[in-house]
Image (cartoon, rainbow, N blue to C red):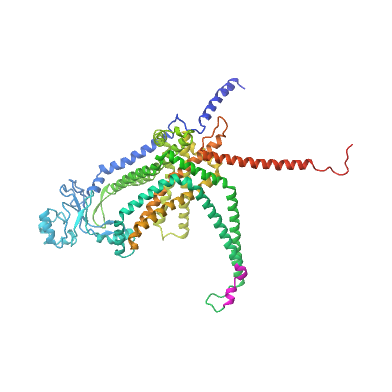
Amino acid sequence: MDPRHLSWSSQQQPHFRIKRTKREWRPLEDRSCTDLPWFLLFTVFCVGMGSICSFTIVTGGAARLVFGYDSYGNTCGTRNERIEGVHLSGLDHTDRKFVFFLDPCNVDIVQRKIRSTALCVSLCPTEELKTYQDLKRFAMINGSELCSYDMAGHKYPSLPERVSKCPKLPVPPSKPLPVFNRCTPVDISCYAKFAEAVVTFVGDNSVLHRLIAGVAASKEIIIGLCFLALVLSMVLMVIIRYISAVLVWILTALVVLGSLAGTSVLWWLYIDHRLYGDSSTKEDPDQDQDPDPDPETSRDRRQALLVYAGAATVFTIILLLLMLFMRKRVALTIALFHVAGKVFIHLPLLTLQPFVTFLALLLFWIYWILVLLFLGTSGNPVQNEETGLTEFRLTGPLQYLTWYHAVGLVWITEFILACQQMTVAGAVVTYYFTRDKNRLPVTPILSSVLRLVRYHLGTVAKGAFIITLVKIPRLILMYIHNQLKGKENACARCLLKTCICCLWCLEKCLNYLNQNAYAATAINSTSFCTSARDAFVILVENALRVATINAVGDFVLFLGKILIVTSTAFAGVLLLNYQRDYAEWLLPLIIVCLFSFLVAHCFLSIFEIVVDVLFLCFAIDTKYNDGTPGKEFFMDKALMEFVESSRRLERAVERGRNRVKEAVSEGAEMKPMAPGTSSA
């Protein structure tokens, strides 16, 4: 072999060793940017989202939404340019700043909009106008003409076209909406039909009014109970480590007792049917019931009960064996919950993550909705063939802006949620791999945020895009399923539901893998795909532990949510008890329960992320370290106790195996010699 080749190999071997030692699953200080192309792609996409907003502002869509426009394409409060082919367009409405509908109660239930001619007026009528003389007097006194632009105000009572070009009498008193400058009736009773279509509330108006009155009268109590749910959620995140063991063993006992009880009931039914199945019928043949079943039917029932009882018995045995063999992993779940509680004590700013994420999502959703409304009033003027009114619609390639905007909703929402996961993972990784907890950084959360912004936005954008690729087809299939409800056949309905269910399961699995990939990126500063692969290998090696932690941990967290909801509801019942009418405090209590569950879900989801990241760190720690000098563990004392107990158990099992082997070998050596043989 060429010696130069040998020298090249020997020189390159240390280089490979250096590369391998750089990835020792330690939080690195010398980080580098990950998935930079995806960061650039996401930046370009966000620029496109901003360009859509700029387009709606430049083309007048934003102005038409805010200031309003009439049925002839004129924007209120501004000077307008004439639209070709549209009568009464291009008017100067500088002094006419409010939109007035000739028939505000003509509501399209399907499209959920007012099907009425709209005019720009200088003042909304503040009192009821019953006759055309009242319309004339209002126009003369206030200078606000409520009929069509081509009609003079002083001629309203005498013109024959007043019926079609003037508002429907009587004109209800109205006032302008804040910001949006639409004249809306003070009495919204004419919108009752529309409200029924939107809310689908069935019942008399008195019940609805009492429910709304109950909410209005109890608003202080509702706010106080919502604050109580918030405090309980934050407290539970800290104290759950003290009650997790109790909750876990209660869960285990309930599952075991439930399976045993179900199996016993099935066997009792089988024995009862076998021995006394037809006795009641034979004792009272005149009772009003079906005739006695034939022997074949009775035998089929007994066989069915026997199959059910046998299956339940097999299930119970398997469950008991799983509980027996997985009890150590249940102990690991309890230890992880205990350490997670300590994490929140050392990193109290973690409790603010739900607030920050919710605020970011709220601001983005408000922006998205506003731009969507801007898009609804942007585009080219088109005359509606059915009503003859002028509307603005996106035509040609511009109509795809709405789809682009919809994709942005999903991708950026997932990006914000992924940033939360990466921030929490970075802080927990810093906590875990710091041996002396007193030397933690002053603000690990802020340090994690800075690392995310500086190095890992591309990784987060890529993970969010993968979730978007799965979520958008699922949403489209759900929309198709809703549109075809009652029209498709059973096979198509089943196929659609199956596809939706499969995509939902895939999305959940990818979410879990992404979360662990972000944790691996926080440790090794590797790209998304590399981190996902490394995390997947670790999770597969600890599959049983993962299954136990997810099953037991999720149920414990669910019990925590139920605890918060029931505590808040109980407090609400005590505070609302003075309102004797059931309908008056039912709706406030429902609102409080929904809000408390939402708050508990947001906070305990952070706790769940912390537990998952701690488990990944624990699995890495036990894989690459063994507690010997130079390979000391990073784990907390509670996890160390779990490892030591596991090792003691393994040593005891190994000693038992060795004793069995020694006994077997000694028995083989003491086997007697065959008869007929003798020593010389």
Total marks in image: 0
Residue 25 location in percent, x, y?
A: 51, 34
* Residue under the point 50% across and 43% down: 336
Where residue 459 sits in the image (x, y, percent)? 43, 37
- The vertical placement of 444 against 195, above or below, is above
Q: Is residue 47 above or below residue 131?
A: above
Quadrant in the rendering for residue 141: bottom left
150 on left or right of 477: left
Query: Image check: 435 left or right of 669?
Result: left
User: Can residue 304 be seen in this snapshot?
Assistant: no
Depth check: give the residue in front, 74 or 13.
Answer: 13
Q: Main secondary structure of the magenta part?
A: helix
Q: Is residue 274 magenta?
A: yes
Place of residue 84 in the rendered image (x, y in percent of width and height, measured from the top left): 21, 48
- Where residue 98 sits: x, y (%)? 19, 51
Q: Is residue 555 left or right of residue 41?
A: right
Q: Which residues are magenta?
A: 272-284
Q: Nearer the viewer, residue 658 or 455?
A: 658
Look at the image and tell me in which quarter the N terminus lies: top right
Quadrant in which the C terminus is drawn: top right
Q: Residue furthest right?
A: 680
Q: Residue furthest bottom?
A: 286
330 drawn magenta: no
Residue 571 visible here: yes
Looking at this view, is 380 or 534 the one in front?
A: 534
Q: In the image shown, does 161 or 69 lie closer to the viewer?
A: 69
Which residue lies at the image location 20% right of the left edge and 58% below the top edge?
102
Q: Is residue 190 above or below residue 532?
A: below
Q: In the shown orientation, is residue 154 left or right of residue 59?
A: left
